Amino acid sequence: MLGRVNHVAIAVPDLAAATAAYNTTLGAKVTAPQALPEHGVTVVFVELPNTKIELLEPLGEGSPIAAFLAKNASGGIHHICYEVEDIIAARDELKKNGARVLGDGEPKIGAHNKPVLFLHPKDFFGTLIELEQV
Ligand SMILES: CC[C@H](C(=O)O)C(=O)SCCNC(=O)CCNC(=O)[C@H](O)C(C)(C)COP(=O)(O)OP(=O)(O)OC[C@H]1O[C@@H](n2cnc3c(N)ncnc32)[C@H](O)[C@@H]1OP(=O)(O)O
Ligand SMILES: [Co+2]
């Protein structure tokens, strides 16, 4: 089912400061900020030779990142995104195996304009999993 790691996401309280740290201190290429109001986030991607780091800041009311930062004020690793070839087949297989698919279970369009789904962190050893169809 799982393909490459598409990205590892880090929730941050200040996206500009986090971008500067990755761009200037760590010398990495960072994309421009992308507001995703339907997901309650503003994101940038740190581009690496073998994967990406997604830096996430809360956007608007009820952001899942705000809730995460309320428990982890300085930020922290938020989720890992795996690529899948067929997100509906993956979802149905996961549900059949008892995994909880978050939201209404229907894929939403993510930062890469691809369908994404999320799996409950409590079903995967305290790690929020995102699936992205490629
Ligand atoms: C799609 C656009 C973009 C992209 O890459 O394209 C993104 O990735 S957007 C990312 C932001 N969107 C999401 O995270 C959507 C999925 N997330 C959710 O539905 C919620 O955040 C949820 C259900 C994971 C957590 O909900 P809430 O914050 O209300 O916390 P709860 O108290 O209900 O949490 C229950 C339990 O889970 C632990 N928890 C919460 N978040 C995480 C996390 N990121 N990683 C690991 N564990 C997490 C929380 O501490 C609770 O544990 P407990 O032991 O019961 O205290
Ligand atoms: Co993500």
Image (cartoon, rainbow, N blue to C red):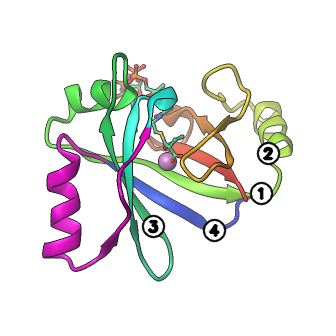
> Badge 2 is on which residue?
90
Give the quarter of the figure containing the N terminus: bottom right
Rounded to the nearest angstrom, the CA distance separating label 1 from label 4 is: 10 Å
**In front: mark 3 or mark 2?**
3
Question: Picture coordinates of residue 79 (x, y %)?
Answer: 44, 47
- Residue 75, given in percent of the width and then of the height, sits at 21, 43
Whole-number angstrom distance, CA of label 3 to CA of label 4: 11 Å
**Front position in the image: 115 or 99:** 115
Residue 66's image quarter? top left
Horizontally, is 78 left or right of 7 in the view?
Answer: left
Find the magenta span and give its range. Answer: 11-35
Apparent side of residue 67 relative to residue 39 in the rendered image (left or right)? left
Is residue 20 located in the magenta-colored stretch of the structure?
yes
Q: Quadrant of residue 58?
A: top left
The residue that mark 1 highlights is 1
28, above or below 92, in the image: below
Q: Residues within 10 Å of mark 1 (few under 14, many from 20)?
A: few
List the residue tagged with mark 4: 4
The disc placed on residue 32 is: none
Give the residue type that dot 4 points to. Arg
